[in-house]
Image (spheres, grey):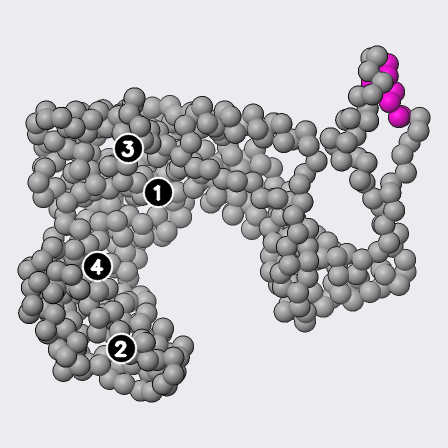
Amino acid sequence: MIEFTPKEIVAELDKYIVGQNEAKRAIAVAVRNRQRRLKLDPIMQSEVKPKNLLMIGPTGVGKTEIARRLAKITHAPFIKVEATKYTEVGYVGRDVESMVRDLVEQAIRIVRKQMHEEVHDQAYERAINRLAKVLVPAKRKKKAKDPSKQGDQFNSLGFPGMQDLFKQLSGEETTYVEEETEEIATNRRHIRQQLREGLIDKHEVTIEINEPKIQLNSMNPAMEQMMEMQDSINALKPKKMIERTVTVKEALEILTEEEADQLVNQEDIHQKGLHLAEENGIIFIDEMDKIASNNQNSGEVSRQGVQRDILPIVEGSQIQTKYGIISTDHILFIGSGAFHVAKPSDLIPELQGRFPIRVNLSDLSQKDFVRILTEPENALLIQYQALLATEGVQAQFAEEAVEQMAYYAVTLNQNTDNIGARRLHTIIETVLEELLFEAANTPMEIEITKKYVDEKLSDKVENRDLSHYIL
């Protein structure tokens, strides 16, 4: 996890998210406190618990984006889950422990990527040698067998036919050795040099790679045990190879990744991933207001059941994963919800107490919408200008046009459902629809003016029935 001061975290978030300074400050302090905890002595570390946050605000104001950007900035394992996808134990649906297992999978992907980068140079050289053998093949012959060892182990135990069966399972019968002549060795040296210089990157080649394992996330412990048993059975069989026809450049990337996977210790990756998830993991639980209730009508009991199931995970418990047991004591939980109908006080008291820091996010104003369209890195208007530029269309947005789009976004949010900044996507798509359609055949320079925006939007915005369906 990369260390930042709270001011640096807020400055980084400001590059992508407009406003919501209170939420940014609160989350920056929470992350910095985790970094401070790691500098304490071990006894004190175990006592300091993370201060979970509850972000309250309407949809589209930046709750999820703040948490997601924070995880990218700090390189921490992060997952976003919806509270409504979980059900009380005994009901059909996902169990709440699956969010922790998903976090572990994410942490292991981060650690695996880091460890692959450490051995990249060595893996790259091995991939070049392997690809050179594919591009300049040599004659192959079956590996000679040692007759003195044929069947000794199993014959002595009274199972004369077992040796042949074992060899078939292990793939020993199909073992080959290469006969590399001086000419082939010279050609391979030339090919390796061309591969390093990228001279044949666009050529196509057929390579054999290990069949990728199927990754199934969010499995319950029983399913994980079944998958582990299947892996044990598959380990007795020879590795299944598949063929792929790709460019030389892609082949080098695939083979480098495969060689790096062989160079690193998988168990080290798993244990480091578990530790990373425990110490730096962030779980963002959205739609917390949907599981809050203030009465005991039918269906509401199940909502409180989900809260009761989430509670032990948030307060700290041991969760079994296929990589080992993980403690949730120091995972940072960020709750989120609009809380239009229900209130935070409608959550069960025990769960309320596990989210001590509450942050209110405000509605976005017209001025905020203007900033969202223009200020952040790769802002929406910059994205659309880049898309159109690929077809030779140079689009410029007049300041009055940007103001008008922001005005229409605010108006629609007031007159229909308030979906926050997400409304801007609809507005821009409607304004640029004709231009995006015609751009493929007509390179041009165009300025989007206030009049142009009014022509595309005014009728739809003023007609409330139409705006409900189109905008």
Q: Which residue is mark 3?
A: 86
Disc 2, disc 3: CB below 8 Å? no
Q: Is residue 33 visible?
A: no
- Mark 2 vs mark 3: in front: 2
Residue positioned 85% across, 61% down in the render: 184
Q: Nearer the viewer, residue 243 or 114?
A: 243
Residue furthest bottom in the image: 444
Q: Residues within 10 Å of mark 2 (few under 14, many from 20)?
A: few
Residue positioned 85% across, 50% down in the render: 140
Residue positioned 70% across, 36% down in the render: 238
- Mark 4 vs mark 1: in front: 4
Q: Which residue is mark 2?
A: 434
Residue furthest top in the image: 158
Q: Earlier in the sequence, mark 3 or mark 1?
A: 1
Q: Nearer the viewer, residue 139 or 27?
A: 139
* Mark 4–mark 2 distance (CA, rounded to whole Å): 21 Å
- Mark 3 vs mark 1: in front: 3
Q: Quadrant of residue 350?
A: top left
Q: Residues within 10 Å of mark 4 (few under 14, many from 20)?
A: some
Query: Does 280 sit left or right of 144 as displayed?
Result: left
Q: Position of residue 467 (x, y in %)?
A: 12, 64
Q: Which residue is mark 1?
A: 79
Q: Residues within 10 Å of mark 3 (few under 14, many from 20)?
A: many
Q: Secondary structure at mark 4?
A: helix
Point out the stretch of residues depicted in magenta: 149-156
Q: Position of residue 283 (x, y in %)?
A: 31, 39
Q: Position of residue 85 (x, y in %)?
A: 28, 36
Relative to 61, say whether 273 is above or below.
Answer: above
Q: Secondary structure at mark 3?
A: loop
Residue 422's disc number = 4
Q: Position of residue 99 (x, y in %)?
A: 35, 35
**Image quarter of the N terminus:** top left
